[in-house]
Amino acid sequence: MKIMEWSHSARDFMQSFERWLYSKYSSKDCESNPAWVGRGLGKSFSFFIVGNNDSKMLVLLDYDDGNGYKPVDFKLDTRLFNHIMNSHGLENYIVFKSQRAASSDLCKNYPIPEENVYPLGYFCDDMNHTLILKSKVKNYNFSKRDIDLFWCGTVPHYPDSDWKYNDLDIKYWGSRARRLGYEKICEIKDRRNDLNIFVSKDLVSFEKYVDLVSRSKLCVDLPGVGFHTRRLMEILTLERCALACEKVNELNFNLLNDKHIHRYSIDYSDFESKVDYLLHNPCIIRQTEENLEEIQQFLTWDYAAENMFKIIEKRMLEI
């Protein structure tokens, strides 16, 4: 089974994955049949057509930060979608979505049937660079870590009045959740002299970021525009203990709570107690980091592609 035609997404951060995917899985004559190469299906969507001797299928890749909770989370150009389906005589399609909701209630405004939507997975911003610096982080002895709690990143300042969906719960607005999380960490830092907390909304170089991660006992992940973040994937790849928001979206493998990751409630009501519990039990932090070795294979492009093609093959057998 090979990719017969493909297009790039408009999302720059995923194009390196696409270039790798298409170079590895495309058929030999794919480049000589470039009718749709370079054309997407609207913001956040790209596609490829995969086939064997008997059948073909359209595969959509949705990299949107939204999981389908809000109406604006779905950006497929249905006119182009229908054109591709009709012009190629296709009857079947599936979607691999990077921010795939973990429950039906969280994708109520995503019009594609749930049984056709699978988690794609999520990746570091620069996988190769992260792996190069990983040895530095892993070799930093726990007893020498001088930062108790660490987070840095950009912070949006949209007021609550910008939320226009009266029928939807504002707590699932990722940008707001990040702002509230940043404010929560700053409030704890101002009040708790017993904790060495590094929190910043200023951009730092990746090398400095990795240095800060290596010195930290506990790394916080706050939601971004989407609830999966590249920072979380970096923390997991660097095998550091992460305290992240309750599960809103799902990945393409089992990231187990209290084994691979620790979580706080989306309203931050238990955030400080979770921080205290973990810092008072460093053995749990160390065990979590040891457990992360067993998921490293699932954080790669190779695993995402292999998992995707297993699902595609299964679905094509059902046609």
Image: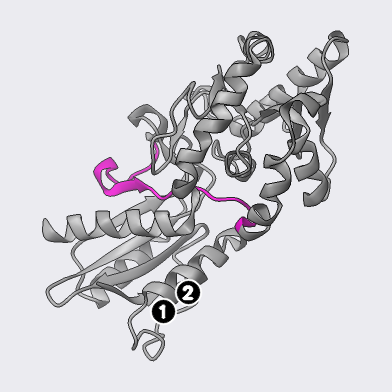
Dividing the image into 4 quarters, which one contains the N terminus?
Answer: bottom left
Q: Quadrant of residue 3?
A: bottom left
Instruction: Give the CA separation, mark 1 to mark 2.
Output: 6 Å
Q: Is residue 129 above or below residue 90?
A: above
Q: Tell me which residue sits at (39%, 91%) in the image.
A: 32
Question: Which label belongs to residue 39?
Answer: 2
Up-down relation of residue 265 to residue 60 (above or below): above
Proximity of marks 1 and 2: CB atoms separated by less than 8 Å: yes
Q: Position of residue 40 (x, y in %)?
A: 47, 68
- The residue drawn where x is 65% and y is 34% is 175
In the rendered image, which quarter is residue 282 located in? top right
Comparing 261 with 37, the one in front is 261
In the rendered image, the vertical position of residue 35 relative to residue 42, given as above or below: below
Q: Which residues are magenta?
A: 109-127
Q: Residues within 10 Å of mark 2 (few under 14, many from 20)?
A: some
Q: Which residue is mark 1?
A: 36
> In the picture shown, does residue 217 fall above or below 122?
above
Q: Which color scheme did the rendering employ for the protein?
A: one colour
Specify the label residue 44 is tagged with.
none
Q: Is residue 170 visible?
A: no
Tell me: 250 left or right of 3: right
- At label 2, the amino acid type is Arg
Percent x, y for residue 221?
A: 64, 31
Looking at numbered disc 1 in the image, what kind of residue is underneath it? Trp
Residue at 45% across, 79% down:
37
Taking the image as drawn, is residue 146 in sight?
yes
Name the side, left or right, on which 314 lies relative to 70.
left
